[in-house]
Image (cartoon, helix red, strand yellow):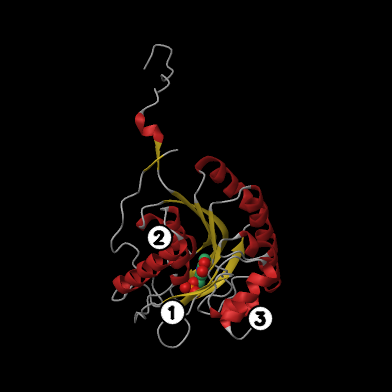
Amino acid sequence: MPACGKRPTPLPTLAMQYSYIPCLSIAGFDPSGGAGIAADIKTFSALGCYAAAAITAITSQSTRGVSAMQPVSAEWISRQVLPVIEDLRPIALKIGMTCNREIIRSIAGILRAHPFPFVVLDPVMISSSGHPLMEDDAMKCLADELLPLCHLVTPNLHELHALGGETDPILSARRLIQRYGARQILVKGGHREGLPTDILVSEMGETSFPGQRIATRNDHGTGCTLSAAIAAYVARGEMLPAAIEHAKDFVSKALEAGADIHIGDGHGPLNHFFGPLPLLVKEKL
Ligand code: PLP
């Protein structure tokens, strides 16, 4: 240390020309660690991306189910997110639980001012245990304001019906594209009988992504994990169809790896760390 007590300014080193691959999650907090932001951070990390996260709501829940939620204020959405965007410049954004109109509008405003290379929205509305995670009057606002700003939306059949209004999920998806300007919808088939095939719907047509059904009670946070994994694979440089295929494979393997574990009395988490990738370092442009 020099005599004046100040640290010398470090000389720029070669390492300063490299960066991680930052992914951001804007989602709800599950203190039991299975769903929401915790699942997203684990997924980004297990897939070698750097995880950043902002909280839309805190919840009271365990593996037994959700009992309450407390949204954060819209002001605190931008207070959390803007410094991270301006400093880390995340490549991919995953949006989960959005709770209410104020939060939806706040996120939409941020996206209009700071377009991301890739945004995936998991339009979370209700927990598997049946507790609402979004206020009733927020659904229309989500469709009007957020859908057109996202590259991909990943609704399950219930969410698709609530948003698109049609009994046939593909018709609902097409309606979201034509009426609300959504770009691509991944219709998740997990709640259907038989094999869980997902269908990607866009103006170009439909592509099927067959999946496997894994017998397990530990499925809490499956939807969160899928959308976060798609974001991570896109951030790593994959085109969307490959990212979806690899994300589905990641979810299946994480479900399989966690199937025999007993943690909590209810629906436990996936095992995200069955084969973690090292944190990827990329040369900065
Ligand atoms: N809690 C949070 C914060 C979530 O984001 C979600 C789903 O996205 C849930 C709970 C519900 O998860 P599950 O439907 O797997 O119970």
Viewed as shown, does residue 76 lie left or right of 157? right
Disc 3 secondary structure class? loop
For the residues bearing labels 2 and 3, Cβ distance under 8 angstroms:
no
Residue 117, image x, y percentages: 53, 52
Q: Is residue 4 left or right of residue 137?
A: left
Q: Residue 251's spot in the image, x, y percent?
A: 38, 69
Residue 197 is labelled as 1
Q: Assess mark 2: CB under 8 A from ligand 1?
A: no
Please say if 218 is above or below 112.
below
Residue carrying label 2? 43
- Would you say residue 135 is visible in this rendering? no
Mark 3 and mark 1 residues within 8 Å of each other at the beta carbon: no
Q: CA distance from mark 3 to mark 1?
A: 21 Å
Q: Amino acid at mark 1?
A: Thr
Q: Nearer the viewer, mark 1 or mark 2?
A: 1
Give the structural element (helix, strand or loop) at label 1. Answer: loop
As drawn, the label of residue 279 is none
In the rendered structure, are the residues bearing label 1 and label 2 in contact, judged by CB atoms less than 8 Å apart? no
- Mark 1, Cα crowd under 10 Å, few <14 / some 14-19 / many 20+, is some
Closer mark to the observer between disc 3 and disc 1: 1
Q: Distance between the Cα atoms at labels 2 and 3?
A: 31 Å
Residue at the location (38% across, 55% down)? 45
Judge the density around disc 2: few (<14), some (14-19), many (≥20) Cα neighbours within 10 Å. many
The image quadrant that residue 142 belongs to is: bottom right
- Vertical arrangement, residue 101 with respect to residue 87, above or below: below
- Among numbered discs 1 and 2, the one appearing first in the sequence: 2
Q: Secondary structure at mark 2?
A: helix
